[in-house]
């Protein structure tokens, strides 16, 4: 009798289990090798070395276990349950640029991914956190295939004391929360990048139709998700067709997940970029302000209630040495536009610069908009 009374209580205290589904690539399975050539080479090299990416991630998850649930090594461990939750690292985009400017060669590697929680039984996405890492190098010669692969490895494993894609996945899993009930979903649904802004964005980010919009959505989504701590449904025009996201796990299995319909929709505009000479500094160097201009709108589509609607601007100052013959402006413009949405997200999280907000936002009632946006974000965690 005592056992029958105590057992339900003990069972109720058991932590939620989430299976680690592995390392995956999004999109049609038959185009993965074409769209992710370097990431696939990295994956193969790790397997050949006896440390597959799956094992690297599992070891890191075990070393830094989540605080809100327990990681199960296999989905099979959850069979028979009413709900079988799983998490995967899903790479959504790989960009490698090797450009020449005079005698210099700039190598840039960018990987964007999702920390994807899903119900393996219903194949519905439950939570999703965007992550990315960019590595830029300047060489005096064209980058070789081995040099590119060395940078790709750094993107995944970290560089310059910054966590790479693998560590960022583990960090997001460690602090993620699985809601006890159905949560409310946020999604970036509309992206507009003006021709003026497009002119500043390098060609490798415009490799196919919709690529720039997907890049912009990922940038804004990651800024909000990381700083506010809320999941964001992937931008469906870049990741899914008909709101169904397809991806292939490293063991070869192909899964299709249904993306939830957002309760709140975000629209963003990238209006333009501007470089302004600020001052001459000691030693002949020149100080420039790199400015980014945009807008964001957050609305509940069912009621058409607007929570946030404002134009934004942000400037970042950079000092260019007189001896520097070539200046690549895009990384500085990137810092300006990324900083614009990061600073906004920090204000929404209650840790940002209110003075910056008052100077950057065009909306007259921005303080009240931030207050109601904060309350909305609490509902989405």
Image (cartoon, rainbow, N blue to C red):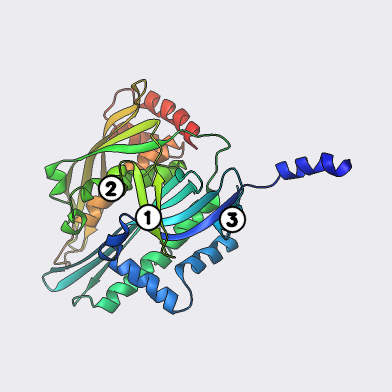
SS at mark 1 in the image? strand
Percent of width and height locating residue 284: 17, 62
- Give the image quarter of residue 307: top left
Which residue is more in the foreground, 12 or 287?
Answer: 12
Compared across the picture, whether 17 is left or right of 208 comes to right
- CA gap between label 3 and label 2 equals 29 Å
Percent of width and height locating residue 181: 55, 34
Image height check: is 362 above or below 286?
above
Which residue position holds label 2?
238
Residue 146 in sight here? yes
- Label 3: few (<14), some (14–19) or many (≥20) C-alpha neighbours in 10 Å: many
Compared across the picture, whether 4 is left or right of 298 comes to right
- CA gap between label 3 and label 1 equals 21 Å
Q: Residue at x 18, y 45 (%)?
A: 273
Which residue is more in the foreground, 210 or 120?
Answer: 120
Task: Give the total number of marks visible in the rendering.
Answer: 3
Which tag is nearer the camera, tag 1 or tag 2?
A: 1
- Give the image quarter of residue 298: top left
Which residue is more in the foreground, 49 or 288?
Answer: 49
Q: Using the image, tell me which numbered label, if any, was put on residue 247.
A: 1
Compared across the picture, whether 296 is left or right of 130 comes to left
Which residue position holds label 3?
71
The disc, 1 or 2, on the residue closer to the chain's N-terminal end is 2
Residue located farthest toward the right when viewing the structure as drawn:
1
Percent of width and height locating residue 258: 40, 43
- CA gap between label 1 and label 2 equals 13 Å
Q: Which image quarter holds the N terminus?
A: top right
């Amino acid at each position: 009798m005592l056992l029958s009374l105590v057992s339900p209580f003990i069972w109720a205290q058991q932590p939620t289990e989430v299976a680690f589904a592995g390392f995956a690539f999004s999109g049609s399975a038959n185009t993965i090798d074409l769209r992710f050539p370097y990431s696939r080479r990295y994956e193969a090299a790790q397997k050949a070395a006896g440390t597959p990416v799956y094992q690297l991630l599992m070891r890191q998850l075990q070393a830094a276990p989540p605080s809100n649930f327990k990681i199960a090594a296999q989905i099979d461990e959850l069979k028979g349950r009413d709900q079988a939750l799983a998490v995967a690292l899903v790479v959504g985009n790989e960009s490698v640029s090797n450009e020449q400017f005079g005698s210099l060669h700039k190598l840039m590697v960018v990987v964007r991914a999702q920390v994807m929680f899903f119900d393996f039984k219903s194949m519905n996405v439950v939570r999703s956190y965007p992550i990315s890492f960019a590595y830029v190098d300047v060489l005096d010669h064209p980058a070789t295939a081995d040099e590119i692969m060395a940078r790709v490895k750094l993107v995944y494993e970290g560089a310059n004391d910054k966590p790479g894609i693998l560590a960022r996945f583990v960090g997001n899993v460690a602090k993620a929360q699985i809601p006890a009930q159905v949560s409310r979903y946020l999604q970036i649904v509309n992206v507009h990048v003006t021709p003026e802004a497009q002119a500043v964005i390098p060609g490798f980010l415009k490799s196919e139709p919709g690529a720039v919009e997907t890049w912009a959505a990922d940038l804004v989504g990651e800024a909000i998700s990381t700083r506010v701590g809320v999941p964001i449904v992937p931008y469906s025009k870049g990741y899914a067709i008909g709101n169904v996201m397809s991806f292939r796990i490293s063991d070869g299995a192909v899964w299709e997940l249904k993306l939830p319909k957002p309760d709140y929709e975000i629209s963003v505009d990238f209006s333009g970029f501007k470089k302004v000479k600020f001052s001459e500094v000691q030693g002949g160097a020149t100080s420039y302000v790199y400015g980014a201009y945009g807008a964001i709108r957050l609305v509940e589509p069912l009621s058409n209630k607007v929570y946030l609607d404002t134009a934004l601007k942000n400037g970042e100052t950079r000092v260019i040495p007189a001896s520097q013959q070539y200046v690549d402006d895009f990384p500085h413009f990137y810092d300006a536009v990324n900083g614009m949405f990061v600073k906004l997200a920090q204000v929404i999280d209650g840790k940002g610069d209110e003075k910056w907000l008052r100077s950057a936002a065009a909306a007259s009632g921005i303080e009240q908009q931030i207050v109601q946006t904060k309350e909305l974000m609490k509902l989405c965690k």
